[in-house]
Every structure is written in structure tokens, then in C-alpha cells.
Image (tube, rainbow, N blue to C red):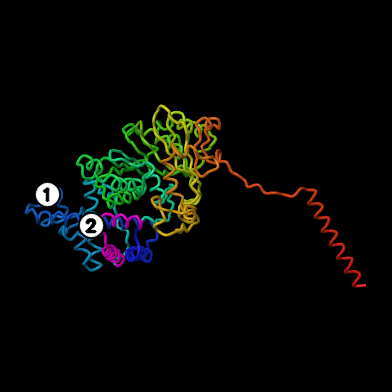
Amino acid sequence: MVTGELKRQIDAVWNDFWSGGISNPLEVMEQLTYLLFVKALDEQQTLAENKANRTRKPIPAEDDIFPESQAFQPEGRAEGRPYRDLRWSRFKNLPPSEMFDIVENYVFPFLQQRADESTHAKHMTGAKLTIPAPGLLQKAVDGLDAVEMADRDTKGDVYEYMLSKIATAGQNGQFRTPRHIIELMVEMMAPQPDDVICDPASGTCGFLVGASEYIRREHPGALTDNRRQRHFHNGMFAGYDFDNTMLRIGSMNMQLHGVQNPNISYRDSLAEDHAGDAEAYSLILANPPFAGSLDYEGTAKGLLQVARTKKTELLFLSLFLRLLQPGGRAAVIVPDGVLFGSTKAHKVLRRILVEDQKLDGIVSLPAGVFKPYAGVSTAILLFTKTNSGGTDLVWFYDLMADGYSLDDKRAPLMHDDKLGVLAEGLVEDEHAANNLPDALTRWWARNDLELERALTEQSFCVPKADIVINDYDLSINRYKEIVFDEVPYDSPASIIDELQMLENDIQSGLHELRAVLG
């Protein structure tokens, strides 16, 4: 968690960009990502040099990012600069005008040249410095250099805090999923060290980061076993997006959280064929965009075979079913319309989830959970791909509070130690402000104590037969029963008698008043 001086330092860097003329939050985030990547390269070179000094062996060519005795000459420039001048630790001490020249004309072309050397570097293709003035670049470099990011946890927290400042919904309807909602979904799915995890609409890679942090916390042995460590860094995580800015940001988010080589790639998930990825993943975590529709011609034919529709939220649901291997699990966010929509495609997909797969649960989210970006009502859909059915009961939870106000401010309603899904010892009033811990506890009891819960309670189970009778309607309000308190009322006759008595009293009073006035 970023607090105190660290928070002030990051806010100062952000404010410098705004006062320097860059007001688009995504552009600010992209430029900061470039600078952090350059800083990380310098840190990698320093580690390689230290190792070489200890072992008295030269740095291997593949690890020598800035060869000491060589120069870098960008294409089209008459002269080059020594590689050492491109290092963060060197150019940060130069005068602003010289620093700007090196970063714009040498460092950024250098990043593009390295684009094929790692999964993170490949997203630097097309990297362009849009910081307009040397003074602003110096403030940004000085500000980032002053932020202490010595360990992985701090680096990750700093970047997450920066991401929280993105306050734009974007042209394609993407917006950042709140971290505590991600944590709830990850905890419910409980990723395992051998899982292969995918987010087909990865954005900032928040779900993949959340899954990686869960593995580190709950399965620390996965990072000490050689086979599992290779899997964690190279094969466990896959994320796709068709926005290059988001790919850069998401890749940096993974890098700063210590995942070395995730598969973060450019892909239009709904338009491209997925024959190579069919049944490739054991876990899908996603909050796909659901603010638009596609033409049939621009949609992957394999998705239309499941349900012929133009709605992106339904196409993504078809995609999840295609990508999951048998036995694979999914926790995905969908708009409420998916749960009760009356079109043929809506009903077909709900029937598939209930009859052909195993629909495990549905968490209804409060309408303000994505404010200020969007006010649409949503739910978390939890299911397992079986291709042979298995739905006996569906668990429902009515999440009414997530620890934050549900207006545009989304201000915390309680102390930090009472926020989030892992908060412990919440009393009744605190539960009323934060339902997340209770939702997780009841999720794991869905096949036991939850079976005894009445339909009037915050969570309950519904038999498959009831869902079938209701045309596969999956909205919680279809099954939740509301108990109204009985209010006693007087009989009509007694009310009339009381009114007549009041009228008599009024008339008597008026008669006495006339007598006094003569």
C-alpha cells in the first residue's frame, strides 16, 4: 500500500506532467512506463556488472545491455553515443537540454532496436517520447529516481497506485477493474502452481498480477522448484489486448511484479481465429469490454458457431468456453443483461452454462462498483468447463457493499485493515460496509452450510430445476425472496369513527368560538 511520503512523491511526478501540458492520463502512464523500463534496464546492467566483479568473469553478451566499449548509432544519425550515456544512472545527472537530446534521439531508438529481445521489450516497438520540454523530462526523471523502489512489492505497489490515477474509460469501453474486486475473484478461483492462466482482454494485466501475487503468497514453493519456477515465469500467464498502449502498461505491470516472461501479446480476441489456443488454459480471469457490438464479418467464425450474436459480452463468453480446457475454471465479469437477456443468443449461452458445463455461482455486484468510469450493473460469473454438465445447484450472493462509497468518489468507508477480501474480524456494522470477506467465506461453504440458507438471505443456493423452469434466467432477483414486515392497520370502520370524532371536536370548538365573539 502506497502511503505518506511515497504517495506524495508519485503525486508530485503526476502533477508535473499535468502542469507541463500532458493531461491525458493514459499518455502520462505510457511515458512513465517508458522511463521505468529504461531505469529497469540500467538496474539489470548494474546487477550483471556486480556479478561479473564477484565471479571475475566477463558479462555474457546476451546480458550486456550497455556494452562499455561500444557506441550506439541510431539509423539516420551521423554520429553515435557511447552505450554508457544511455544508462539512467548517467543521463539523470546531465543538464536538461543534453538529457533531452540523449533520451529522445538515442534512448528511445535503442528501445525500439531491442524490441525482439524479451516479451517486455517487444512492446517498446513504436516507443515515442512525447514529453515536450527538457525541463519536464528532468522533473520526471528526478521524481522517479527519488521514489524508493528497491524491492518487488514496492515496485508493484507504486505502479498499481499510478494505474489508479487512470480516470478515462477509453474508446473501446475498457476501464480498470478495482483491485479489491480482482482479489475477490482470484481468491475464489485459488490459482494453483500448475495452472495456465489467461485474460483475453488483459488491459493493465490486473487479473494476471493478482494471480501471480496469490501464487507467491499461497504457494511459495512454486518459486523454488525449478520446473514450476520456469512455468511461473514463462508459461503460466497469457494476456491479450489490441491497444498497444495498454499492452505496454500491462507488460510493465507484470515486470514490476516480478514475472519475467509472460505472454502479453497484441490480439483482437474476438476477430482472430483461436485454433491454436483452443482448450489451452486451465483458468480464465477477465473483465472484458461490453460496451459495443461487432459486425458478423469482423468476428471469428468459431465464436459465431456457439451463438450468433454481435454483442461483445456474449462473444467473449463464447470465447471463454472455447479457450478453457475441460476441467478449467473461470471467474469473469458480465453486465447484468447477460443473466436475463431475452434474445436467442442470450438464452443459448445460459443454457450451455447450465446444461453442458457446470455453473458454480453468481455474485451480483453493486451498481456503483465501476464508478466513475461506468454505472452499469454487473455480476461475477463463476463456472467450470466440463462439456458434460454437472450443474446441480447454483450459488448466488448479493454483494451490496465493497468497502467504498458507491458514488463517483469511491471513498473508503473504513480503516485500511478492514478493507479488502482478506479483512478479518468484521463486526456486523463493518460487514454492512464490506461484504467481500463474507462472500469469500460463503463461496467456500457453498456445498455445505450454504445449502441450508433461505432464499431471503444474502446468499443462497438454487436448484438447477428451478433455473430451467425460469427459462435459464440467472438474475438474483428472480430467486431472492423479500420478506416484508407486517404493519398493523386499523379497520376502515374505526378510522371513519375516529375521523367523525375529530370532526365533532372541530365543530364544537367553532361553536364555542362564535359564542365568545358574540
Residue 330 image-quadrant placement: top left
- Amino acid type of the residue tagged 1 in the rendering: Pro
At horizontal 46% and vertical 37% (from top left) the residue drawn is 314
* Residue farthest along the left direction in this orientation: 56
In the rendered image, the quadrant that contains the C terminus is: bottom right
Q: Is residue 155 magenta?
A: yes
Q: Main secondary structure of the magenta part?
A: helix
Front residue of 304 and 199: 199
Residue 457 placed where, x, y %? Answer: 53, 43
Secondary element under disc 2, as helix, strand or loop, is: helix
Task: Please indicate whether residue 280 sits to the left or right of residue 62 in the image.
Answer: right
In the rendered image, the quadrant that contains the N terminus is: bottom left
CA separation in Å, label 2 and label 1: 22 Å
Name the residue beneath numbered marker 2. 107
Residue 205 placed where, x, y %? Answer: 34, 47
Q: Earlier in the sequence, mark 2 or mark 1?
A: 1
Q: Which residues are magenta?
A: 135-162
* Mark 2 neighbour density, 10 Å: few (under 14) some (14–19) many (20 or more): many
- Up-down: is 451 above or below 174? above
Name the residue beneath numbered marker 1. 60
